[in-house]
Amino acid sequence: MTAIDERLLRELAPQVLGAVVRRYGDFGTAEDAVQEALTAAALQWPESGVPENPRAWLIQVAARKFTDHVRSESARRRRETQIALESASEEPMAPPPDEVNVERDDALVLLFMCCHPALTRPSAIALTLRAVGGLTTGEIANAFLVPESTMAQRISRAKQSIKSSGVGFVLPAQDERSRSIGAVLHVLYLIFNEGYATSSGKEHQRVDLSNEAIRLARAAHALLPGNAEVSGLLALMLLTDARRPARSGPNGEIIPLDEQDRSLWDRAAITEGVQLVSQALTGGAVGSYLLQAAIAAVHDEAARAEDTDWPQIVALYDVLMQLADNPMVALNRAVAVAMAEGPSQGLALLEQLDRDPRIKDHYRLAAVRAHLLEHSGKLDAALRAYAEAAEKTASIPERNYLLLKIARLREN
């Protein structure tokens, strides 16, 4: 299967899952059926070719798999079996017209469904990353900084909670949207981050994930146009994604922010993002996404890396630290302090993070320390820190970048 086909399957997966859940209502069984349909596509499409309507093909196969699964259940599931048999024939059935010909954003409905108040917030976020984002359990565990086994249990409990709650597959009412929006935004933020800087594997970026996160953030913004944090998250995504064309070299190698060709940045996305930030800041309430977007805007508005207003970025991080107990925010603030006041000040802040169990073993902490040590002239210590970071990261492009840094330092 080609890389294009794989991306297509990842893009279609949440839409197909949404369609199957909407028809049958059983989230867990629907997810299993969709996974089987995706597997069938991965096996059949390389030989038979991609169908003219791949989404309809996947829905059709998933419907058959769902029916087969329900029919194989024991007597205690006889009532659910009867319901499913009334909705599906023995042969793979074509999806109803509204599932094929009418533009529906099932992924957005699925997003709100997974973030239902019946679930705890961590469970809701984990389930949505799995169902809507298509992330593996390992990738989600990495985003939460917890063991994979812990995350697998959390996702399993979330599926059971969805089933027990009887949540319907419809967009929630306005007041319910407001209650769920915090979890929804967190999910979209994590999906975007995994797409923008993939945590493991050969690829540095998964554009399908970041694009889907932006699309869903736009849809959420259309539902809640007056919500400053929705505007802030959409702005953050646009301002960050605007740099994507300059983040990688011709061979996929990572190009850090201060070395990027800024003429390649997407100026239209930057303009839209800055406008969203400016409008949201006039609304009074300021949240974490809006502050992060403001930081991204300061970066993007600098014509050259040396023109970056680092003191302003430090000031924004100071406010953000008051809102979010997040070690990654603290790490990014340490970088900003180092750029504004010198690497020794940044290194001092890293010592505090060495005692935080959420991040002390994360490769980024070692990588930032290596960078600051290098700029402090402590090359031997920098080499050891770069080697530690390279050993800890699961991302091949990140590892290659860190190993290249080691090789260049040794040459000097």
Image (cartoon, grey):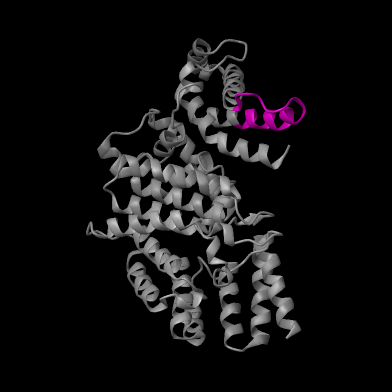
Q: Left or right: 396 with respect to 260? A: right
Residue 260 x/y as whole percent: 57, 68
* Relative to 52, residue 389 above or below: below
* Relative to 357, residue 22 above or below: above
**Placement of the C terminus among the 4 image quadrants:** bottom right
Which residue ends up furthest to the bottom in the rendered image? Answer: 377
- Residue at (54% x, 13% y) in the render: 88
Residue 336 x/y as whole percent: 45, 76
Residue 161 x/y as whole percent: 43, 36
* Relative to 210, residue 387 above or below: below
Question: Is residue 361 shown to the viewer in this render?
Answer: no
**Placement of the N terminus among the 4 image quadrants:** top right
Q: Give yes or no for residue 33 being in the magenta stretch.
A: no
- Residue at (49% x, 42% y) in the render: 127
Question: Is residue 106 shown to the viewer in this render?
Answer: yes
| Magenta region, main secondary structure | helix
Q: Give yes or no for residue 36 being in the magenta stretch.
A: yes
Tell me how many marks there are.
0
Residue 326 x/y as whole percent: 43, 65
- Residue at (43% x, 42% y) in the render: 216
Q: Left or right: 224 with respect to 19? A: left
Q: Which residues are magenta?
A: 35-54
Q: Image quadrant of residue 13?
A: top right
Q: Left or right: 43 with respect to 175? A: right
- Residue at (23% x, 56% y) in the render: 283
Towards the viewer: 166 or 262 = 262
